Image (cartoon, rainbow, N blue to C red):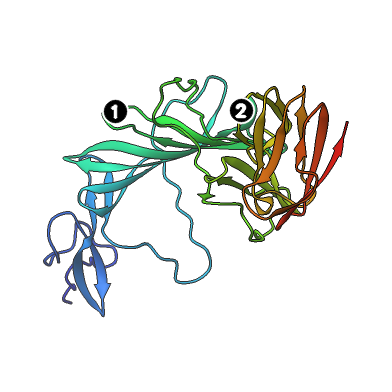
Amino acid sequence: MAVPPLYKAPGSGGSGGGSVAGSNTQVQFNDGGSLAGTSLVTIDKTNNFVGICGGVRASSGSFSCTLSGGLLNSKASLGLLLNAAESFPAGFAGIANYQFGTYTSNTGYASASINAISAESSTQTSTTLGANLNFRLVPVGSAALTTRVAFYSSGSVVLNASGSALSTSATDGFVYIGSGAGRPTGTPTANTGATPLYYDTTNDVLWAYNSSWKPIAGVGTTSTQSGNYSVPAYESTTIVTATATITLPDPATVPSGTRKTVIDTGVFTVGLATAAGSIVGSTSSVAFCFFNCVSDGSTKWYVSKTT
């Protein structure tokens, strides 16, 4: 009886005969009933690598991949290293580590990594499953991974997780938030337990949304002026020590109900003006007095004067 190629008859010894499909290191597979090889899946037995050029897809159900080390190549020069060897802070156990980088001549060069480690020096058990997640990058001109952002199981997010304070002359390493020219007027999409921030570059005011936009930078500050002066949107009290014209900000740039106080501390002629809109009430003083100003958040300042 003839023995089919690559098979051995039951009970017979030795290896089967026949030719091998594909090129060296390529995985063999059933291609419509015929033996075939493909360059999409290769095995490097010298360096213990399985090369996959293309996607890995679960045809049904779920897909899991458990590796103690290895390289999945999407291209010859790019790779993802799963559970790569990496040092973790003392007392913390590594759970998983994913490194991204280049792969050349069997040598990997990590340029970024995402790693999960046990939370707060705890050991992972059935009752203690806390984990922290770190995002690490290699700075330009360096070969070392540096933690940039850390998410802690307690809910804290550390945006400078490098472990080093920024220099006062630093040019990078900052948190950037949205900004625009003028007071924000839109209603942000709500996210429970979180507050949107916005920086007004026209009036130099940091705003936070809580039912409405509210200025939070410098609120409650006081300045002393001896000449004409434009009151910033965030300043609450202006003390005047000489004859001057004090100009209130555009009432539309501050929330309705915002209060500002202008104090004439002597026998001076102090005039009150507004950058836009109008003033309803007193606008001048020739002696000790307080101007109490309230914005309607739109077009007017309502001013009362007390002595």
Circle 2 — which element?
loop
Q: Is residue 134 left or right of residue 33?
A: right
What is the quadrant of the C terminus in the image?
A: top right
Find residue 301 and report its horizontal and vertical position in percent.
75, 50
Say if residue 123 shows up in the picture: no
Please tell me how crowded label 2 is: few (under 14), some (14-19), or many (20+) other residues with Cα within 10 Å. Answer: some
Which disc, if any, is residue 155? none
Q: Nearer the viewer, residue 244 or 14?
A: 244
| Along the viewing direction, whichever of 124 and 9 lies nearer the viewer | 124
User: What residue do we see at 55% from left, 29% from top?
Assistant: 93
**Identity of the amino acid at label 2?**
Gly
Q: Position of residue 143 (x, y in %)?
A: 29, 28
Do residues under tags 1 and 2 come within 8 Å of each other at their CB atoms? no
Q: Any mark on residue 143, and which?
A: 1
Farthest right residue in view: 307
Left or right: residue 251 compared with residue 17: right
Task: Give the image location of residue 54, x and y in percent.
Answer: 29, 62
Q: The disc labelled 1 sits on which kind of residue?
A: Ala
Q: Disc 2 marks which residue? A: 227
Question: Helix, strand or loop at disc 1?
Answer: loop
